Image (spheres, coloured by chain):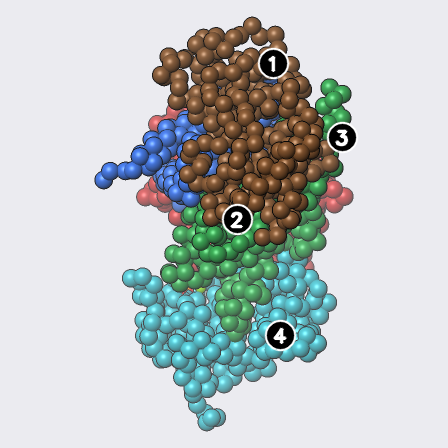
Chain colours: A green, B cyan, C red, D brown, E blue
Amino acid sequence: MSSAFSVIIDSLPYLLQGSFITLGIVASAMLFGLVVGIIMAVGLVYGNRFVRLIFSGYIWIFRGVPVVVLLFLFYFGIFTYLGLSFSAFTSVAVVLGMTTGAYQANIFKGAILSLPRGQFKAASGLGMSDFQAIRSIILPQILRMSIPAWSNEFSIILKDSALAFVIGAPEIMARTQFVASRTYQHLPLYITAGIIYFLLTWAGVLALRKLEKRLQIPGYSHYGS
Amino acid sequence: MNENSPILRVENITKSFADNTILNQVSFQLEKGEIKVLIGPSGGGKSTLLQCVNCLVIPDSGRIFLEGKQVDFSRRQDLYLLRQQVGMIFQDFNLFDHLTALDNITIALRKVKKKSRIEAEQRARQELEQVGLADKEDLYPAQLSGGQKQRVAIARALAMDPKILMLDEPTSALDPELIGEVIAVIKQLAARGMTMIMATHQISLISTLADEILFMEKGSIAEHGAPEILLGAGNNSKTRGFCNRLDELSGVEK
Amino acid sequence: MNENSPILRVENITKSFADNTILNQVSFQLEKGEIKVLIGPSGGGKSTLLQCVNCLVIPDSGRIFLEGKQVDFSRRQDLYLLRQQVGMIFQDFNLFDHLTALDNITIALRKVKKKSRIEAEQRARQELEQVGLADKEDLYPAQLSGGQKQRVAIARALAMDPKILMLDEPTSALDPELIGEVIAVIKQLAARGMTMIMATHQISLISTLADEILFMEKGSIAEHGAPEILLGAGNNSKTRGFCNRLDELSGVEK
Amino acid sequence: ADKIVNGIDANFPPFAYIDKTGQPSGFDVEAMNWIAKEIGVEVSHQPIEWDGIITSLLTKKIDIIASGMSITEERAKKVSFSTPYWVIKQVMVAKKDSPLTIDMILKGKKTIGVQQGTSEAKWLKAEAPKNGWNFELRYYSSAPLAVEDVLNGRIDAAAMDDAPAKDASSKKAVHIVGTFGMGDEQFGYAVRKEDKELLAKVNNALAKLMKTATWHGLIKKYKLDK
Amino acid sequence: MELSPFYQELVTSLNRGLVMSIALIVPSAAGGVLIGILAGTVRTFGSTVFRRIGDTYAAVFRGTPLVVQLFILYFGLPNIGIYLSPYMAAVTGFTLCSGAYQSEYVRGALLSIKSGQHLGAQALGFTRFQTIFWIIVPQAVRRALHGCGNEIIYLIKYSSLAFIVTCIELTGEGKTIATEYFRFTEVFALIGLYYLVLVTIAMFILKKIEKVLYVPGFGRA
Ligand SMILES: Nc1ncnc2c1ncn2[C@@H]1O[C@H](COP(=O)(O)OP(=O)(O)OP(=O)(O)O)[C@@H](O)[C@H]1O
Ligand SMILES: Nc1ncnc2c1ncn2[C@@H]1O[C@H](COP(=O)(O)OP(=O)(O)OP(=O)(O)O)[C@@H](O)[C@H]1O
Ligand SMILES: [Mg+2]
Ligand SMILES: [Mg+2]
């Protein structure tokens, strides 16, 4: 048991360095997904039939195919064919970003639909263009409402980032495995990894809750759980 | 522009949703300073008509002239401009829930009229004062009572310097005790000579303010005329029957 | 039970939320067949008082007697029984959204009164007929108009054979044109001798039905008495002032 | 190229693993460092999941695989191998106190763990019906995990290369039962077929290295001689 | 049409994996929903102690990667004398993890039921339990359905993690072929297609269920 303990102590700095990579991937993916999600959600609600069809197709595929599969496909296949020589880190961030983008699109779309229709009408009634109405009236409201659902998405992506290892970005899970293979202390190391993830999730969710509080406006209810 | 030509002319507006014809060849016109009141049974098309006037709902056919100039329904810029000139007050206020009372007013001034923040705020404060809410500028819609919300909505519309104000049942979402404050503001607007068209069930507004009553039923204007005539004792109009029924429900029975 | 003893006696009910005293030593009693109307400004505690009577809100202190028997606030069974005997109609209906009109009525009969499905449905149909909705039994709340919803809510309460019916602003969430149908049902109940206590702003209900008016303000009954007296010309009561203000807002101004 | 990337399976001690300081280390890693110096390029070592390592090479994410890769016919169709530098035997590992023999493991309705995608996994699966062996195979994502389950008693033995087996037996309560009839395999470095120049340089340097004392020092250091 | 030997072998393997995937997904999805409803209800209406327990369960299983959970269930539990078979370990892990997420949706739905529904029921003399069981839960289930369906789709996609506990399903079988032939792109494109079909069928079934349970006024969020 003492050897398990000393292995954990010894490897902790190495594992914790991995959490920077993990957080880097998660942050880039979430931001990328935010942009994708907003564009898609707006397109899905206000776009014409053609736009809606394309975006729905995108969401269908990215919701239907596991991230590992997408990662292999893009990293070894599509990116290569397109001549994009992304690093492992960038590739993971982009693929996870495209995936969470599909989910975020659904979150934002739900939020837009949950807004009273009068909000858009009133903006139009004042002479705002559709773009102005979406930018100044719709988005500020739905982004606020979506923070809880978004923090859910964050915790999912945080854990999905462990898949980064299949293409060689050495984040927490990969490092755990490396140390375990060398030391044969699998169980204690996996438990340690579990705790690190738990703390990261907790910290992230807490930070988002802070943000939500800061942005809070009297009388707001949330969309999603 | 000829001083005597109507400020707004609506001609043969028709609108259907799916197979339902909601508005059928509706025409009317509005002179400067005139107040028209739309009444009639629920579902008669009052809201739809008002929304057609500023093209929040685009009519299937018909024409709209603002100050003698026809509005081209297919040109977005035309629509945006029309809506700036025709203010709209909704039954359920539709204040922007994420903005304070002040910002509810400034946002359109800044984004649409491209005014500076300072200018916009100055104007907004002025309008808030007019509706008696000078001290509430920092409150969010959720912190305002219904009557206060509706007054902010009115201030928001007025800040855009509209040529016409349209009000769609401005008091019907209010608690009976709060109706008074909104009615007072509307009467004050009338006194200042604002051109208005409003849908309402509020007898006190109908009988005291209306220059003309339009009675809408099944998508058409079934009757119209001055209130003295339509509501006059002995007149057998639909309008009078309808108003009497409204009256019975709310009035003290003797 | 003595025929002359009140069916409901409420003694010194006090209720606070956090530091706010919402009800302060309120007492009243209700005779069989009597109709009392609660009026007063918003926030005066009318809803809270009604909810205290059937212990949806448990009073902090005070006593409630139903047919002479005191209700033990700490015994759940007592509360369940009390609520079965005191029917309640809410302003926003509170129909069960996942059940049809018929099932909204049968569910309590079956689960609470343990009646068979057949018996329950028979009874439910009878009540729906009474409120004029025999043909709507298969519709869900979302498919009913406000007036119809409120009538189902009334049928649902009546099916439980309550000794008393409490109505909390039964018409204030309704469109003006739909109010009439609910008022008709309430008048019909009154005619059948139902014991009722209701909070309302509806002048026609107050003046025609009330045996006694209770004017509530700041958590206390500020005035009470027969409408002929309180509303009588020349009487300087708060009640009359309040009703006149309601009246002004909705009545035709001459 | 003056910079090359070496893809390694960092779960394959002692040939390639991550050391205490978090740096890639192991027999192959050190050998590759020497070779790189010799041919005048910079080398970095990139840990990659074994499943995807050849595809990574083919899609130019890495330039060479020096990570205990057995030379097989199928692999040789896709990539070029250097001259073999190590002969490896496949062995069975069982609990230290286990009385099982190879024969008993193969024919006694036992359960054997293997790493998914390895040559021993393939060989055992293919040979079983021919020889009337009746064991059951379990697939693990790495050999150390198979050892873990041997210790848990869920499986009776694990088949793996002898070097990691020795490593395991030095750290855990398992022992090597012996070879089980699979032909010896040779390790080689893999490069893309078109990188003929690189291959030639690597082969030259490797030949040179194998003659030095450093090579034997490495073998000693990683206990490959036992 | 004759398939090349590569594709023949690939399709055979993938079909075998598909059977295993389905055998993993179906019981886990059902178990997850059941646990989710139970835990969600307890977390909303339970006593303080039960609520704490429920919240902790949800936090732990939502806060740690499924890989770690599976690993502990399979390689960790033997330390205290519990030996789960690979299949059992996978199904247990999936069920517990999925249940934690489901409970979150159920809880959200329960909380979203307007207080008027409680009042309406209580005013008729319903007991607390009757109110929850007959009025609140039936409505909440309809509200939660969409989110729960989403969660089942997640589960389908995450079932590939069963490889951690040596359970070889769709992805695992595909990987074996891919490493053997080094044809990752084709193999993974095909695996992707299999999952897409699985997910689409699941969405179709969920739509059907939504339709069966449809009540006017309970549109999706
Ligand atoms: N977007 C729409 N799609 C389909 N039908 C619509 C739409 N908008 C309105 N309607 C229908 O048009 C009819 C007229 O509606 P409108 O709101 O104009 O009536 P109204 O006279 O304003 O009634 P109320 O007094 O209740 O406000 C109604 O039957 C309504 O159902
Ligand atoms: N659960 C609660 N917690 C805190 N305060 C409450 C609660 N319920 C009611 N109140 C407060 O009690 C006061 C009386 O409310 P109540 O709803 O009884 O008034 P009311 O006379 O029915 O008014 P209205 O005519 O607007 O319905 C209000 O100030 C309200 O904010
Ligand atoms: Mg309308
Ligand atoms: Mg009230």
User: Is C234 left or right of A223, judged from the image as shown?
Assistant: right
Amino acid bearing label 4: Arg
What is the CA distance from the residue labelled 1 to the residue labelled 4? Answer: 79 Å
What numbered label is drawn on residue D175?
1
Residue at (60, 41) in percent of width and height: D205
Label 2–label 4 contact, CB within 8 A: no
* CB of mark 4 near ligand 1 (< 8 Å): no
Say which chain tag 1 marks: D
Percent x, y of residue B169 = 50, 66
| Number of the front mark, 1 or 4 | 1
- Same chain for mark 1 and mark 3? The answer is no
What is the CA distance from the residue labelled 1 to the residue labelled 3? Answer: 28 Å
Packing grade of label 1 (10 A; few <14, some 14-19, many >=20) is some
Say which chain tag 2 marks: D
* CB of mark 1 near ligand 2 (< 8 Å): no
Quarter of the image holding residue C231?
bottom right
Residue D210 visible, this angle = yes
What is the CA distance from the residue labelled 3 to the residue labelled 2? Answer: 45 Å
Residue corresponding to mark 2:
D197
Residue corresponding to mark 3:
A9
- Is D84 rendered above or below residue B153? above
* CB of mark 3 near ligand 2 (< 8 Å): no
Quadrant for the C terminus of chain D in the image: top right
Residue C80 visible, this angle = no
| Secondary structure under the numbered disc 4 in the rendered image | helix
Amino acid bearing label 3: Ile
Packing grade of label 2 (10 A; few <14, some 14-19, many >=20) is few
What numbered label is drawn on residue B110?
4
